[in-house]
Image (cartoon, rainbow, N blue to C red):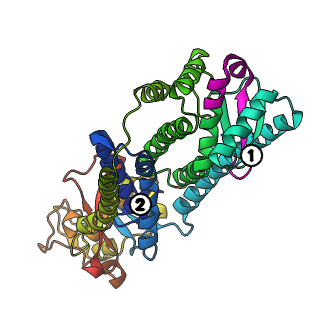
Amino acid sequence: MDLGVLLSLPVESIAVRAAIATVACVLLARLLLRIGIRTPWIRVAAAVMPAVAIVTVIVIAASQPRLPTLMVPVEARDGLAIRVAEGYLYFAPMVFPLLLAAWALFAAVRLARRLLVARAAYRRAFHDVSAGLVPGHVRDAALSVARRLEVPDPFVTVTPGVAGGAYVVGSRRPVVVLDADLAAQLDDDELEGVLAHELAHVKRRDNLIAGMLGAVRDAMFFAPGVGWAVRHLHRERELAADQVAVRVTGRPGALASGLLKVLDQGPRAGHACSAFAPSGGLVDRVRMLVDAPAAPTRPRRTVELVALIAIMCLAIVAALVIPSQVAGAERQREAVAIVWAALTGDTAATTQARAFDVYNRNSVDIATTVSTPAVVRYDEHSVENHQGTLRMCAIDPDACPRPVYNLGLGLHPRPVVTIDDAVVRSWQATPMTESVPSGPGLQMYWLGRVGER
């Protein structure tokens, strides 16, 4: 029995293109942010940009997705020949697209979990609202801020043990959840600032945008950099909501004081919708409120927007061009094969190689010192009859076993190897390194279609 598995990853796969677009967007966006983007909504757009690039690449490359393929060893001679330590294995794709099914299942589980968590938080918040345990001054402050922000009147609930002190769930029918201990510590100005911050998320539709970006992260979990984009979006939307709250209340110090009281409560368990969860970013937000940097000018905003669009276009072009360049003009590097393979088991049960049949038919009698002629034959259990040796002989005539006796007629039989047309049209594997492992292990090959070259 032959053991092995081969993962074929086309360099022009839609998955590879999406990964390149994400990495390029993240690296260039982080560089641009470090240089200095000051416009809040453009900083938020920098976090959304990787998701936009991924969707754009998927739409462009959807006609030729070139999905990764999982292959297993077969006995057919028209499979993909991979040389291992003792010979060759022939791989063919699995009939069932296992990798695609695994990706779909994993992504579906992640998306379902996200939906269930959001739904549970929303239902729990409405359950607390139905209890009606909301102080009158909290409800009045929330309605006053909502009118100034021109957002729908929110539902408000005050409950103990709220992670992060306060959060808002929902967009069309928002619910503001406030921790009971925090509400008791806040004065009127601080309470107004905290409520203005939460309702700023409603005005900016941050929950909807974060949910969409989270769904992209769940579906493209294999793409590096998506996690950074989500974390950056969370940080920037908090800073932007702080600025909106300050414009409405006109009291940045009151909001900063409320944030410090959240920090004094100490860390608690995280929450999917928590905006005030204590973290290193909370200190940065207080510093931003106290320092109050000047608003960027219109020319600067224009330059920052153009730079962000240029970065996204550059990342998309790189995702479309780099894989084609790696594949080569003759497509000799069309895919990367990651192989784990070994030759094991009893060779007697396997089909004998066609080339070795020819070799057996060329056995001849030889003269010896005794009167009885001897026939040169190999032991069927010897290493010369090993399955790997037979397969190597079929592929490489120089690897065929040699007779250990001097033949009487001076003949040196060699098998006549013929190749099916199907083999000519199959993949050709080129090792990335010169050495072949002496035992089972991982190997990497460049794959190319012989018939397409």
> In this orientation, which residue lies closer to the viewer: 229 or 281?
281
Compare marks 1 and 2 and give the one earlier in the sequence: 2
> In this orientation, which residue lies closer to the viewer: 324 or 298?
298
Q: Position of residue 235 (x, y in %)?
A: 48, 37
Q: Position of residue 31 (x, y in %)?
A: 29, 44
Q: Is residue 331 left or right of residue 119?
A: left
The residue at the point 16 percent across, 68 percent down is 407
Residue linked to disc 2: 53
Q: Is 66 placed above or below 314 here? A: below
The residue at the point 53 percent across, 55 percent down is 216
The residue at the point 53 percent across, 35 percent down is 246
Mark number for residue 153?
Answer: 1
Identified by mark 1, the residue type is Asp
Quadrant location of the C terminus in the rendered image: bottom left
Q: Is 265 placed above or below 63 here? A: above
Q: Position of residue 384 (x, y in %)?
A: 30, 58
Q: Is 83 placed above or below 152 here? A: below
Magenta range is 170-193
Q: Is 279 placed above or below 148 here? A: above
| SS for dot 2 | helix
> In this orientation, which residue lies closer to the viewer: 255 or 9?
255
Which mark is nearer the camera, 1 or 2?
1
Count residues near mark 1 (Cα–Cα under 10 Å), then give few for <14, some for 14-19, many for 20+. Answer: some
Residue furthest to the left in view is 410
> In this orientation, which residue lies closer to the viewer: 214 or 129?
129
Tell me if residue 19 can be seen. Answer: yes
Q: Is residue 71 left or right of residue 268?
A: left
In the image, residue 180 lies in the stretch drawn in magenta: yes
Identified by mark 2, the residue type is Ala
Residue furthest to the right in view is 131
